[in-house]
């Protein structure tokens, strides 16, 4: 019993010391919460409010940010890049977003497509709470949040007959995309959750040890894959079971530029990011048996 009490005391002391250190070393700290999955930080500096995930002693990276004085603007390149989905699927009725962050993406989609039903699958209830408290994320009869592992939710929803016109994969932990959301088996489940003509968009990195493996995995699961390559290390993969095309710059600008301008999106710049495949097609496909962990731990 004394040993158990000593361990509890040590754990409490360590947690208190950690929180105290965060307040000392993290400028502009608004909120810190230790969830089941990570430590969540919300900071605000120079008019920018950001959410970070911290696991153990790994460096924290901003997962979601918004400008306090201009909350509609999509701060990160990748969120702007994901808006290219609307150039392909201009009127999706059902949208699934895997990974919530601060909720800026579903909120922007809701404003642009008020008739669409937007469901976000987020495993961590502490993230949902922080998004509502600090990042203006709001639920209603068209904006829903499922607090569940996305893969589990997807399987159950498909069994119940749910399908989506647009699925956005944007789930990240402190390292990268959770490994069970990167495999061919998962992507085939995602493909099976699409309505006819449906589209998948995935936020990924252009500089990663998994780059080639991740790319061929998408090609193994989807017959049609296109890539948008950003200048700051992000890329967006567009994938579908059915053929799809991106519009010309003139067509897209005429239809979308005025609507997307408040979010900081330049439609012509988005379309200029189209890039041909540049990955090694001999790389091994990621599976539930051969996962990112097999590669990252080498």
Image (cartoon, grey):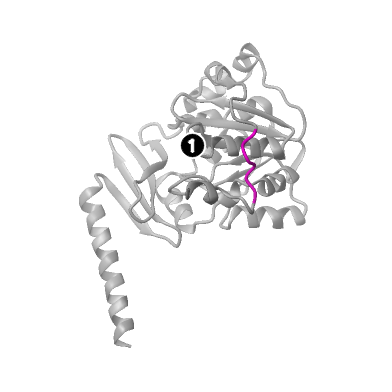
- Tell which of 279 and 186 is nearer to you: 279
Residue furthest out toward the bottom: 1
Compared across the picture, whether 280 is left or right of 223 comes to: left
Q: Quadrant of residue 188?
A: top right
Q: Is residue 35 left or right of residue 105?
A: left
Decide: is 277 above or below 187: above
How many other residues sit within 10 Å of disc 1, few (<14), some (14-19) or many (≥20)? few
The structure residue drawn at horizontal position 32% and vertical position 45%, both measured from the top left corner, is 43
Question: Left or right: where does residue 63 sit relative to residue 252?
Answer: left
Q: Is residue 93 visible?
A: no
**Residue drawn 54% across the image and 50% down it:** 294
**What's the residue at 45%, 57% (across, down)?**
126
Which of the pair 69/62 is nearer the observer?
62
* Chief SS of the magenta region: loop
* Residue 10: percent from left, percent from top: 27, 73
Give whichever of 27, 233 is nearer the camera. Answer: 233
Nearer to the camera, 162 or 1: 1
Residue 185, horizontal then vertical, whole percent:
69, 49
**Residue behind mark 1:** 208
- SS class, disc 1: loop
In this rendering, the answer to whether 60 lies above or below 253 is below
Quarter of the image with the N terminus is: bottom left
User: Among all residues in the image, which is located at the extreme top?
Assistant: 250
> At 51% across and 29% down in the image, what residue appears?
80
In the rendered image, residue 249, in percent from the top left (x then y), is placed at 61, 14
Residue numbers of the magenta segment: 282-287
Residue 138: where, in percent of width, then height?
Answer: 51, 47
Residue 83 is covered by the magenta coloring: no
Q: Which quarter of the picture shows residue 289?
A: bottom right
Left or right for 98, reference 232: right
């Amino acid at each position: 019993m004394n040993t158990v009490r000593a361990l509890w005391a040590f754990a409490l002391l360590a947690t208190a010391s950690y929180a105290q250190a965060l307040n000392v070393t993290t400028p502009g700290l608004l909120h810190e919460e230790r969830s089941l999955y990570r430590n969540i930080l919300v900071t605000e500096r120079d008019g920018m409010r950001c959410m970070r995930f911290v696991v153990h002693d790994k460096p924290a990276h901003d997962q979601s940010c918004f400008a306090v004085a201009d909350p509609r603007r999509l701060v990160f390149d990748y969120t702007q890049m994901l808006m290219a989905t609307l150039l392909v699927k201009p009127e999706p009725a059902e949208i699934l977003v895997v990974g919530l962050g601060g909720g800026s993406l579903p909120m922007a989609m809701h404003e642009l497509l008020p008739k669409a039903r937007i469901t976000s699958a987020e495993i961590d209830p502490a993230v949902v709470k922080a998004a509502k408290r600090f990042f203006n994320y709001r639920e209603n009869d068209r904006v829903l949040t499922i607090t569940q592992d996305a893969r589990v939710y997807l399987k159950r929803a498909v069994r119940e007959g749910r399908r989506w016109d647009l699925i956005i994969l944007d789930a990240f932990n402190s390292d990268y995309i959770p490994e069970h959301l990167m495999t061919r088996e998962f992507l085939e489940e995602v493909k099976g959750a699409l309505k006819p003509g449906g589209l998948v968009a995935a936020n990924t990195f252009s500089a990663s040890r998994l780059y080639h493996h991740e790319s061929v995995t998408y090609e193994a699961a989807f017959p049609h894959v296109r890539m948008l390559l950003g200048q700051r290390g992000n890329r967006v993969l567009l994938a579908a079971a059915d053929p799809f095309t991106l519009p010309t710059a003139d067509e897209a600008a005429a239809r979308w530029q005025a609507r997307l301008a408040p979010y900081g999106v330049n439609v012509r710049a988005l379309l200029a990011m189209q890039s041909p495949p540049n990955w090694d097609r001999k790389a091994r496909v990621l599976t539930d048996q051969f996962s990112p962990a097999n590669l990252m731990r080498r």
